[in-house]
Image (cartoon, rainbow, N blue to C red):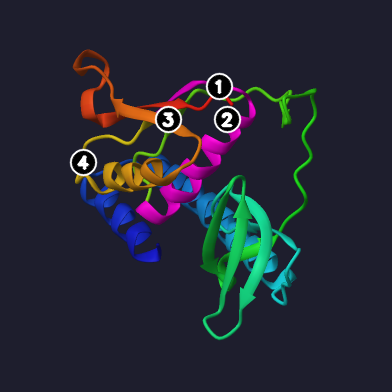
Amino acid sequence: MNKKVEYVIKELKECNASSKSIKTAKNLISELKEKNKKLYSENIELNSEKTNFKAGDYVVINDTQTSGQILEIDSERNKALLSVGSLKMLVELNSLLPGKAVKTTGIKSNNHTYSSDSISTRLDIRGDKPEEAEFKVIKFIDDAYSSSLERIEILHGKGTGALKKTVKEILKSHEKVTNYYFAPIEIGGDGITIIELSKE
């Protein structure tokens, strides 16, 4: 980051920028550096909060919004088996942070709890790494199903095709997905996957 800062200042000087412009740039850079330090220290504090997890603990996967409950811990492989919605997921222990049990509000009907929180019908994962996108997609599908949505969309873009492949692999094995296909060409084509969910 410091190297980038020095480069920017050098460019400003070589372009004969005014001293006022250079001063303004330096102030903005200083603010960004302070914010970066704060974010880094907060992340360290979260990671150091708890590492001795056990079965039954509620956790959150670091850098994602995915939460679940630990079912089993494999100490030899340093992994934990999580229950995330209707799925089970094996993740690295050092990627977990302490979480809380998810409480839903609403009415129960046909053995399902419908949350009062509104949920978007589209998830944008463009720019994400496949492993990050995997957590987001699974949670998105589970939340949509719990909210009784029947049709949702995932915007993964065309790019290298890695995200598209990740989404396809998840949808193939997800028990709540009844059908999935690319959007019509005029609204995104194979950069968007449309998903139909079970009504049961």
SS type, badge 2: helix
N-terminal of the pair, mark 1 or mark 4, is 1
Q: Is residue 82 left or right of residue 58?
A: left
Q: Position of residue 182 (x, y in %)?
A: 27, 26
Residue type at the position of mark 2: Tyr
Magenta highlight on residue 146: yes
N-terminal of the pair, mark 4 or mark 2, is 2
Residue type at the position of mark 1: Leu
SS type, badge 4: loop
N-terminal of the pair, mark 1 or mark 3, is 1
What residue is disc 3 on?
A: 178
Q: Position of residue 92 (x, y in %)?
A: 53, 70
N-terminal of the pair, mark 3 or mark 4, is 4
What residue is disc 4 on?
A: 159
Spatial CA distance of label 2 from label 1 is 6 Å
Spatial CA distance of label 1 from label 4 is 28 Å
Q: Position of residue 26 (x, y in %)?
A: 45, 51
Spatial CA distance of label 3 from label 4 is 26 Å
Q: Do the residues bearing badges 2 and 1 touch, measured as CB atoms within 8 Å?
A: yes
Q: Do the residues bearing badges 1 and 4 touch, measured as CB atoms within 8 Å?
A: no
What residue is disc 1 on?
A: 149
